[in-house]
Image: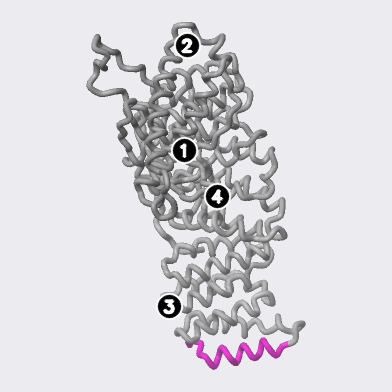
Amino acid sequence: MAVTIEDLYRNYGVLADASKDNLSQHKDAYQVILDGVKGGPKEKRLAAQFIPKFFSSFPELADAAINAQLDLCEDEDVSIRRQAIKELPRFATGENILRVADILTQLLQTDDTAEFNQVNASLISIFKIDAKGTLGGLFSQILQGEDIVRERAIKFLSGKLKTLPEDVMTKEVEDYVFAETKKVLEDVTGEEFVLLMRVVSGLRVLQTVNGRQQLVELVVEQAFLEQALNPADPDTVDRLLQCTRQALPLFSKNVHSTRFITYFCEHVLPNLSALTSPVAELDIQLEVLKLLAEMSPFCGDMEKLEANVNMLFTKLLEFMPLPPEEVENGENSANEEPKLQFSYVECLLFSFHQLGKKLPDFLLDKVDAERLKDFKIRLQYFARGLQVYIRQLRVALQGKTGDALKTEENKIKVVALKITNNINVLIKDLFHNPPSFKSTVTLSWKPVQKSEAVAPKRPSGEEMGSGGSTKKQVSPQPRRDARQIYNPPSEQRGGFRGGRGRGFGTRGNRSRGRIY
């Protein structure tokens, strides 16, 4: 016979009126309440509230009670599901915490917004009861659950852990998060890698120099810096971009970028023109050079310093053309003068300048006379074209303020002036005898200071003829600062292959089954 509303209220009354010592003697009354999950919508809503209220008094019926509540969490009626999910934290006692956390994690797969928000709220509630146990349920599903659950569990950790207070996220709990995250990172997509790095980078226990170094080691492992780069494989290139972007905020005067810089100099710069971009509209050469420039101030001692400086020098020469030959009448023999690629040169010159501080005698003792002479000719020619363009830009921007500087054309000119001024400062250092490496500049795409009038976009590969004609190639990307994370081009798991079963890997799809 089906349980009615009256049955539920009557047996609830029996349990509510019983003394605490005698409550366990009314097992039959609690069983009637458990059977309420088999009734209609009204009976189910009452059962969802009554079952957890007396749950702790009947340990012998614990499994049956949790299973009954779980049936309500999977009911066809979303209002019943929300009520049952709201009450789930009341079951999170003792050894049940892991199971409740596991169940709530699986329930993240709902597409109902209100229900999803309730699941999040319930997870936060049990975090405050037992954070480590809750994390056990979350990581269990991340490692073994179906794809949609894994994805949402990782996003939950990425968004919610940082909001929890220190008395919840203790050192022991944070150590557990780090240990479990390292397991997950053995097989992740690019998007998952970014989110998980956000999780561990926010842990208080890793804010020390040693902690940041551990995070760099984590990224190094994902980046496969011990393997040669395949420039034709967009997935491989994408992996390197993402990993470098994740490492950048970690570098400091005590946490060095040396291994990344060496890898870029040995494997990336020699293949710069052959790199296949993972995103069609991305200027991959400029993106790589910008990353290298941002890392270069944090380079520590390196075994291959001279080789790395020499590679930067060689690549810099490629972007600093020789002046065109003149014919007898004094005119240029070529119809077009060489293009000066200021954006690329800013990055390379800055990187060369930063590493040059560690090897200040490079241009004096490490470069042969002919090569040094060639460099000076290129540098002088580039400097002349630079001065022409700087004058043109200043004239174009003279007297412009406020809204006039906010037009797209003038934003580009403002950034172009930053680029050319940076190059000018660095070139002046190299013209010293002996060359100096003392000047400092702020890379043109770094965030503007509050005192500056505008926030212009970063032009991509701006070119100019030495006679003053300009050709501006504007990047389709929005301006980003030095710490922005590189966004992966795809959310599809398995799109990033490491070749050795670790890192951005291929994971099998799982069909949805019953929550347990």
Q: Amino acid at mark 3?
A: Asp
Write down the residue under mark 2: 372
* Side of 103 relative to 464 (left or right): right
Q: Amino acid at mark 2?
A: Leu
Q: Amino acid at mark 4?
A: Ser
Q: Residues within 10 Å of mark 3 (few under 14, many from 20)?
A: few
Q: Residues within 10 Å of mark 2 (few under 14, many from 20)?
A: some
Q: Residue at x 46, y 78 (%)?
A: 79
Q: Residue at x 39, y 23 (%)?
A: 319
- Looking at marks 4 and 2 on the same chain, the residue that comes earlier in the sequence is marked by 2
Residue 258, image x, y percentages: 58, 27
Write down the residue under mark 1: 418
Magenta region includes residue 220 = no
Residue 372 versus residue 255 in the image, above or below: above
Give the magenta range: 1-18
Residue closer to the observer: 404 or 104? 404
Residue 44 versus residue 379 in the image, above or below: below
Report the label total.
4
Write down the residue under mark 4: 451
**What secondary structure is marked by label 1?**
helix
Residue 11 versus residue 290 in the image, above or below: below
Residue 105, image x, y percentages: 53, 61
Say which of marks 4 and 2 sits in front. Answer: 4
Say which of marks 3 and 2 sits in front. Answer: 2
- Looking at marks 3 and 4 on the same chain, the residue that comes earlier in the sequence is marked by 3
